[in-house]
Amino acid sequence: MCSSDQGGGKGFFRRPEGSTSTETLADGNVVKANTVFVKVRPDGPVHAYPLAR
């Protein structure tokens, strides 16, 4: 798992069944997100967002 103790990291993780997150595509279409991207910076901040893959 990503951790600031390990100098940070990033990865893609599958969303659990029943998740209601969506992603709005550049063309305006809204699709169900089935993945979440997580980035942990070495100094601690976390950036995460859902997306369709």
Image (cartoon, grey):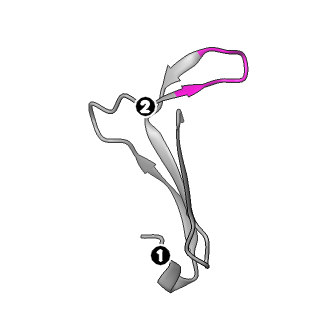
Assess disc 1: are there few (<14), some (14-19) or many (≥20) residues with their C-alpha within 10 Å of its C-alpha: some
**SS assignment at label 1:** loop
Q: Position of residue 10 (x, y in %)?
A: 56, 63
The amino acid type found where label 1 is placed reads Ser
Number of the label disc, if any, that sits on residue 3: 1
Report the residue at 47% width, 75% height from top.
3
Q: Nearer the viewer, residue 44 or 49?
A: 44
Q: Residue furthest right?
A: 26
Q: Tell me if 19 is positioned left or right of 22 in this view.
A: left
Q: Position of residue 34 (x, y in %)?
A: 43, 35
Does residue 13 show up magenta in the picture? no
Image quarter for residue 14?
Answer: top left
Q: Quadrant of the N terminus?
A: bottom left
User: Label 2 belongs to which residue?
Assistant: 21
The amino acid type found where label 2 is placed reads Ser
Magenta region: 23-29
Q: Position of residue 41 (x, y in %)?
A: 61, 71
